[in-house]
Image (tube, helix red, strand yellow):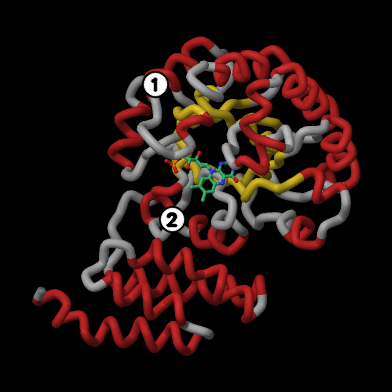
Amino acid sequence: MQLYLAALAGYTDPCFRKIVEDFHPAGMTTEMVSMRALYYGDKKTLQMLTPPDNPYTSLQIFGDDPDIIGACLEKYLNDLPNFSAFELNMGCPAPKIVKSGAGSALLKDLDRAGRIMEVLKEKANRPVGIKTRKGFDEDTLGLDAAKFAEKIGLDYVIIHGRTRAMYYDGLADWDFIHQVAREVSLPVFGNGDITSPQMAEDQLKEEDLAGIYIGRGAIGNPWIFAGKEPSLEDRFKVMKRHLNLALDYYGPYRGIREMRKHFIGYVKGLPGSKKLKQDLVQCKDREEVEKCLENYLQTRPNLDFF
Ligand SMILES: Cc1cc2nc3c(=O)[nH]c(=O)nc-3n(C[C@H](O)[C@H](O)[C@H](O)COP(=O)(O)O)c2cc1C
């Protein structure tokens, strides 16, 4: 099935993507990378450009200024190996991003969005897509954005079926997503609220979508891409591998802190998960995490009893 990992700031870093890779998604996306920060050589931003080992990860970028984006392409992005595509974020709802004129603000300024798309089309040395929303407020500007992308000759469109005003509330409008797929000749990918392979399959049945992007449904659940439920032992094995990757990548201090939100995702829904979460987020190093998981495994029979 054509299931892809969506961009999730704070989550889809190289460590989580390495974990997801083991479950064979059709593709993956980085966290969104600020072109302004990159332009000024910000160190954390440069680290986000770590190339993947696989050839099916797209690099997501956000920005408001076509010239800055063009300069970043020439100075950094085009030289990066392995990233399969560049993806322009036109959907981020965060006030700070919108105020800066980037993310979903581009839906309200399609002229500027078009200029950015033109720069990307002209200068990028690989395929370029956009990831956008249904609209900004009650409108459906996402369809116009997709048509712009088609006119300019970009390569694909991902539609999250909510407006910016909805943030992450309410339900994604899959009828709208299918409408875009019917009206635009580019490959259109759908996104929003998919939490099982069955749900994805239901949407793919209409045969108008090129694939489905999964965001929150993959947090703590990379197994979604393989369509299976892990045993508790497998779950903990993946958690430990993920932790090791984060400790290597970020170093011990930041590594364990980056893992806290992932731990919460991994243990969500387990019996006694409230206490397990509390214990895990207080762990200061690998040994404490291992002890905590071992302890849970040993007390599991009692937990099953309740
Ligand atoms: C914590 C978080 C971070 C996100 N970061 C990004 C991002 O960097 N770029 C992006 O295009 N969308 C981002 N999104 C939106 C998701 O990619 C996705 O469009 C949205 O969550 C709906 O899909 P889902 O229901 O499968 O999660 C983020 C969402 C969440 C919850």
| Residue denoted by label 1 | 207
Q: Residues within 10 Å of mark 1 (few under 14, many from 20)?
A: few
| Quarter of the view holding residue 95 | top right
| Residue denoted by label 2 | 219
Quadrant in which the C terminus appears: bottom left
| Quarter of the view holding residue 125 | top right
In the rendered structure, which disc, 1 or 2, sits on the residue that comes first in sequence?
Answer: 1
Q: Residues within 10 Å of mark 2 (few under 14, many from 20)?
A: many
Residue lying furthest left in this view? Answer: 305
Judge from the rendering whether residue 163 lies leftward or rightward of residue 41; answer left or right: left
Give the amino acid at mark 1. Answer: Glu
The spot of residue 135 in percent (x, y) is 53, 22
The spot of residue 172 in percent (x, y) is 40, 30
| Quarter of the view holding residue 11 | bottom right
Look at the numbered disc 2 and say if its residue's Cβ is closer than 8 Å to ligand 1.
Answer: yes
Judge from the rendering whether residue 170 lies leftward or rightward of residue 140; answer left or right: left
The vertical placement of 112 against 73, above or below, is above
Q: CA distance from mark 1 to mark 2?
A: 27 Å
Q: Which residue is at the front of the view, 277 or 202?
A: 277
The spot of residue 175 in percent (x, y) is 38, 19
Judge from the rendering whether residue 233 lies leftward or rightward of residue 246; answer left or right: left
